[in-house]
Structure formats: structure tokens, C-alpha cells
Amino acid sequence: MKALTFQQFGGPEVLQYTELPAPQLLPSTVLIRMKAVGLNFADIYRRRGNYHLAGKPPYILGYEGAGVVEQVGAGVTQLKPGDRIAFADVPYANAELVLVPIEKVIPLPEDTSFETAASVLLQGMTAHYLTRDSYRLQHGDEVLVHAAAGGVGQLLIQLSKLSGARVLGLTSSSAKREMALAAGADEVLLYDGDWVETAKRWSSEGDGLTVAYDSVGSTLMDSFAAVRTKGTVVFFGMAGGDPALVDPRMLMDTSKTLTGGDLWNHVTTPADRARRANDLFTWIREGSIKLERPKVFPLSEGAEAHRLLESRQSTGKIILIP
């Protein structure tokens, strides 16, 4: 099979499209012929060496995708060759064939395309747990969304609006501001201004927002300044750099809450994984949430896809087609 691999950590130039042996079918697994693979910032972190990788090179990136069952292992009775499935947390997805444990399988409805599944599952389930678990949004909440034109950002905007919240987005350019507004944000500010004070003035009481969803990291203390007394900051990424250390006395004095978020602590059972995915598929089917058309690259041009994502010039999702 063909796969996108790398032998050493570094920039996009370390990625190579090479021939590798197909995975060995194991009990309670299915072998999937991949149709679409989602590209995420975690892939960049792993390629750079920021995240630990098990095993020895050549390494294969990718954790999210969709395809068709090619073979089923011993003990698998609920699936058969030809079935359409997706997944959001299975390694080595940047390949033509991927071995998927049966407990990680998400059945893919006939009216949901492979490209849609690869575009929405990881980012969509992230937005799902952030707005339902990390901080459960309620009608009337006022929400600050960092990186509002990105894949998770646009979904956070839409799920916040579904919950009846007012949404203030933050982006790095006027073009991205228009993207966030199109996703449904009530207002969008640029990072290059005094957005903290403007955000506070924008809030209905003038004292700050209810919750900030911060995936940038280096903006964490500004997020605290932008939420009101007894407000919440949800930290779930550090695309802009490591966050500053937080003084617990500040939390005590302001009665503010800091909570972290990691998807893998929330999708821990097949039932939970299917519930969140089915919510997303239903909302897409109903038109309650809309996805920007993904940017598509052949898997063989994965290095170019990495360069685009790393440049922060892209909006929405990037997917790779084996």
C-alpha cells in the first residue's frame, strides 16, 4: 500500500509518499480502504516532534478518516466488507489501508459523504464536548471563540448559536473575520486591536463574557481578562504558543474557572463516540450546522497540505484523498 510517511522530525519537507506493507488483520479489527483522511494540527505537532510517537520510523501520521471495510477480523460480526465507516481516533490514517479496532468504528450513514465525515468528526466532536461538557452552554450565555475562522472555531460558533448564546469571535485578518461572521458569529474582532476591552464593552453588562474558548494558548491571560467575574475559560489548544502560568489566587479573587479540554477524555466508549457523531450527522442533515467546503489534496501531496495548514492562511478543513 501507499502511505505518507516520515523518517525524522522536521518541516513538511520530511514527508514522503512511499510503499509499505499493508497492516496485518487482527481479531476484533477491520481493515479499511480509505476514501478521505482529515488533516489536523496534531499531525503537525507530531511531525515536528512536539508529541510523543510510539514505535520506530517510518512514522505514519493521521488519526481521522472514512472509508469502506475491506476485511473483517475474527470475532467481528457487526460489520462486513463493503460497509461504510468512519473514525476519529485511530493512528496511521495517512495510508491507503488502515487497521481499525472495532470499538473505534463509527458507522457512516449513506447520506453522509466520506469527505464530510473526514471533515467533521474530530473537530466536530471537539466542539461537541467543549459546549456540552467542558462548559455546558445555556441560552443567553455570551461566548468568546478564539481562532473563529478555523474548523473548530466555526463549529463552536454554530453549536453556541444552537444553544441560544451570543457569540463574539476573534480572528487574525479581515478575510477570516468574514468567514466567522458567515458561520454565524454576532460580531468578530481582530487580534491586532485592543480586543479585550472591546470584548468587555460588547458584553451585555459591559463587564465581560460568560465563557472563552481558547485554543491559542498564548492568549490565556487575555481570555481571563475578557470574561466576567465568575466566568469560565476553557483551554483546549496552544496553536499560538504555550500559555502563561495561572496564579490560583487570581482564580480565588475573581471566582473565575479554568478548565482544560482533551477529546480523548470524553470519547471513551463506542456508545459515546456514536452519540456525538450521530448528533453531528443529524445537525448537518437538518442544515443546523454547515461546513465550509474542505480543501482537498491527494495524499501524495500531503507535504503541500501541511504547508498550507501550518501557514495559518487556511480556513475550514483540509482533507487528503488516498
Image (cartoon, rainbow, N blue to C red):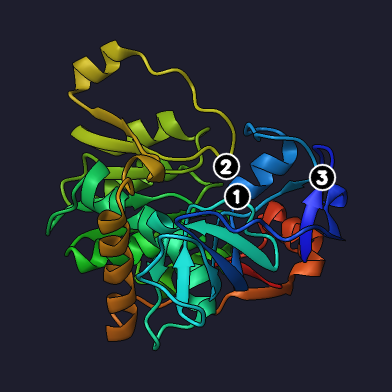
Q: Amino acid at mark 3?
A: Gly
Q: Nearer the viewer, residue 197 or 220?
A: 220
Q: Residue at x 39, y 62 (%)?
A: 124
| Kind of element beneath mark 3 | loop
Q: Determine the CA span between mark 1 and mark 3.
A: 13 Å
| Kind of element beneath mark 1 | helix
Q: Determine the CA span between mark 3 and mark 2.
A: 16 Å
Q: Residues within 10 Å of mark 2 (few under 14, many from 20)?
A: some
Q: Nearer the viewer, residue 205 or 33?
A: 33
Residue topped by disc 2: 239
Question: Is there CB contact under 8 Å for labels 1 and 2?
Answer: yes
Q: Amino acid at mark 2?
A: Ala
Residue topped by disc 1: 41
Q: Relative to 56, is 214 on the left or the right?
A: left
Task: Report whether residue 261 is seen.
Answer: yes
Q: Residue furthest bottom?
A: 111
Q: Report the quarter where the N terminus lies.
A: bottom right
Residue 306 in the image: x percent, y percent? 73, 57
Quadrant in the rendering for residue 225: top left
Q: Amino acid at mark 1?
A: Phe
Q: Nearer the viewer, residue 243 or 166?
A: 243
Image position of 172 with respect to 322: above or below: above
Q: Nearer the viewer, mark 3 or mark 2?
A: 3
Q: Relative to 314, is 148 on the left or the right?
A: left
Labelled disc at residue 11: 3
Q: Determine the CA span between mark 1 and mark 2.
A: 8 Å
